[in-house]
Image: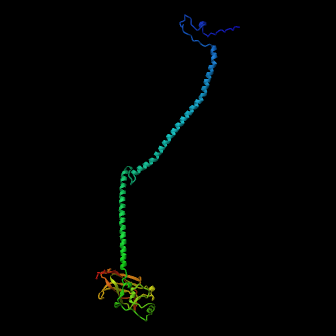
Amino acid sequence: MARRKAPRRRRPGASKGSLGTKGNQRPAGDPSAGVELVMRPSPAGSAAQGPAEGRDKATEIARTVFSLPCLLAVALVSLWRHLLSMCLLAAQKMALQKKAFLQVFLLLPLALAAVYCGTSLPGLKPLWNCPVLMAQQTQKMQLMLEEVARLRAEISSVKQEVEEMKQAASERALEAYVEMSDWALQSSGASIDLQRTSETYTCKKDWFWRFIEFFCTPRSPDRILQPDVSPGNCWPFPGRQGQVVIRLPARVHLTAITVQHISKEVSPSGTVTSAPRDIAVFGVDVDGEEETLLVTFMYDVAKEAIQTFPLKNAPHPRAFSYLKLLVKSNWGNPKYTCIYRVQVHGKMAKPNSFN
């Protein structure tokens, strides 16, 4: 059974003859003939295509809606990175600026202090005068080196002078030893001229001398030419005055005389009243006719036992072979005077000297 076609709907305002069987063409007398009319889709075709287009738009909208958070997240991450890099760069710049500021802050006082010291403090000069200061310091160093060299030369000269002084002192000590050598020593050849010497004191009634003679050999003037000065080993002569003439082993220019007696502490009698006091020394020629006074002195028993008396004009210009020791007084003993030892000092005369 054949279906019945539904009649077409006309759009409102459209004439019935606006549509042809073969196409939309205008009548022959129409001024717009020959112009092709645009065909509008039929309501059925629009209804068929509507759901598909709607789905595509919904999908596109959904995609757009879902892509917005991603795009926003990417934009936020990018913005965060950009902000972070900007913050790091700003922090680095601030750190550099802070370091530079600290350097300037620390160096500025030092620079000010240096300028102040160079321009204000006494004794210092500005830094721009460094070459001048270096030249001055170099000159001062040169002067110091010259001064050190001069001091070294002076020290060397002083050392040489000290060595010369030592040598001179040794020579003087040797001369003093020679001068102080004993020319009245019996072992060296000295002897007593008995003809011009006082007699030896002898008293048999004196208990002291009996005691001495019991232990000792008979006393003689030679005792004063020997180094033994033990108590009692002396030469006594009677009274308070007496003399002894010593023959020297050579002709001597005399310089000093030494007289020795024992002290009171070691004396057997406990006293030293027999010690000589006022003494005069003469140089005697060979014949004994001419005597020359050399020195006078006092032997002090309150001092040391060995006492040396130098001549005023020592060494004496004249050389003597004999020496006369004249005792003028003693320390109170009226019977005898004792002499323990006599030493004669001087220089031996040259062989060709006849003075």
Residue 257 is situated, as x and y percent measured from the top left of the image, at 36, 83
Quadrant the N terminus occupies: top right
Residue 91 is situated, as x and y percent measured from the top left of the image, at 51, 40
Q: Residue furthest top?
A: 29
Left or right: where does residue 69 sit relative to residue 337?
right
Q: Quadrant of residue 346?
A: bottom left
Residue 125 is situated, as x and y percent measured from the top left of the image, at 38, 52
Decide if residue 50 is in sight here: yes
Identified at 45% across, 47% down, the residue is 107
Left or right: where does residue 202 sit relative to residue 285?
right
Q: How many marks?
A: 0
Q: Residue furthest bottom?
A: 205
Residue 342 is situated, as x and y percent measured from the top left of the image, at 38, 85
Above/below status of 279 relative to 39: below
Identified at 59% across, 28% down, the residue is 68
Decide if residue 295 is in sight here: no
Q: Residue furthest right?
A: 1
Above/below status of 30 relative to 129: above
Quadrant the C terminus occupies: bottom left
Q: Front-most of 273 and 257?
A: 257
Left or right: where does residue 103 sit relative to residue 310?
right
Q: Quadrant of residue 173?
A: bottom left
Q: Front-most of 16 and 219?
A: 219
Above/below status of 269 relative to 159: below
Identified at 59% across, 30% down, the residue is 70
